[in-house]
Image (tube, helix red, strand yellow):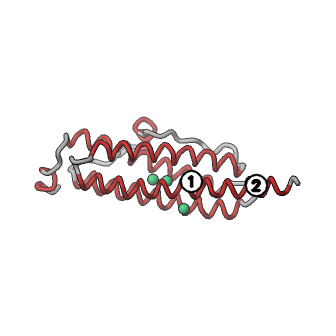
């Protein structure tokens, strides 16, 4: 752990580590939800949607990597037991039990909206207190905003296709 780097944090490091570990747990759940959704998806445009889901899965995993780096820098321990993921995550894991493309998209859009709110909160909590975590949360938030838009525009394309098909 870097001692000077820790000293400049203007909030309780324990509280900060809890927030970071909650986000970390959430990213693993998001990763799995996307990864599995991409494998089982069925319906119109499934190949295009699966490609986006797979890409998002890798990006969620990268968020988990960024968060562990910060947790370790602060002298913390990333959640060691996956059984804790459900308990700690601010966002629910939505099991892709129905493989229909629209259902999968809706579940992941809801997940992104929760993630956007969670990173906004992390930014509010670290503003003027921990610039490094604030900047990290901004980096991740920007990508979650992009994810939401990607999924909503895919859903829009699907809706257009279905509407035209029924004319
Ligand atoms: Fe993420
Ligand atoms: Fe995301
Ligand atoms: Mg994308």
Q: CA distance from mark 1 to mark 2?
A: 16 Å
Q: Say which of 1 and 92 sits in front.
A: 92
Query: What residue is at 22 percent from the left and 48 percent from the top?
Result: 128
From what the image shows, is residue 115 above or below residue 160? above
> Which percent across, then down, holds residue 64?
40, 54
Badge 1 crowding class, 10 Å Cα cut-off, few under 14, some 14 to 19, many 20 or more, is many
Looking at the rendering, in which quadrant would you find the N terminus?
bottom left
Q: Would residue 67 appear left or right of 73 to someone viewing this image?
A: right
Check disc 1 and report the residue beneath it. 34
Query: What residue is at 57 percent from the left and 48 percent from the top?
Result: 109
Badge 2 crowding class, 10 Å Cα cut-off, few under 14, some 14 to 19, many 20 or more, is few
Q: Would residue 116 appear left or right of 95 to someone viewing this image?
A: left
Check disc 2 and report the residue beneath it. 43
Report whether the residue tagged 1 is closer than 8 Å to ligand 2: yes
Numbered disc total: 2
User: Disc 2 on helix, strand or loop?
Assistant: loop
> Which percent across, then down, holds residue 21?
34, 45
């Amino acid at each position: 752990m870097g001692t000077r780097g820790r000293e400049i944090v203007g909030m309780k490091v324990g509280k900060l580590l809890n927030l970071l570990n909650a986000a970390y747990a959430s990213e693993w759940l998001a990763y799995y939800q996307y990864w599995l959704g991409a494998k089982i998806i069925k319906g119109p445009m499934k190949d295009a949607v699966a490609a986006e889901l797979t890409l998002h899965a890798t990006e969620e995993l990268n968020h988990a990597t960024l968060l562990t780096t910060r947790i370790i820098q602060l002298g913390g321990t990333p959640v060691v037991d996956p059984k804790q993921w459900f308990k700690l995550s601010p966002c629910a894991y939505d099991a892709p039990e129905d493989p229909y493309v629209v259902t999968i998209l809706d579940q992941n859009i809801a997940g992104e909206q929760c993630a956007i709110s969670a990173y906004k909160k992390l930014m509010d909590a670290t503003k003027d207190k921990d610039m490094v975590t604030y900047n990290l949360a901004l980096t991740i938030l920007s990508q979650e905003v992009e994810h939401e838009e990607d999924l909503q525009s895919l859903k829009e394309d699907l809706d257009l296709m279905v509407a035209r098909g029924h004319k």
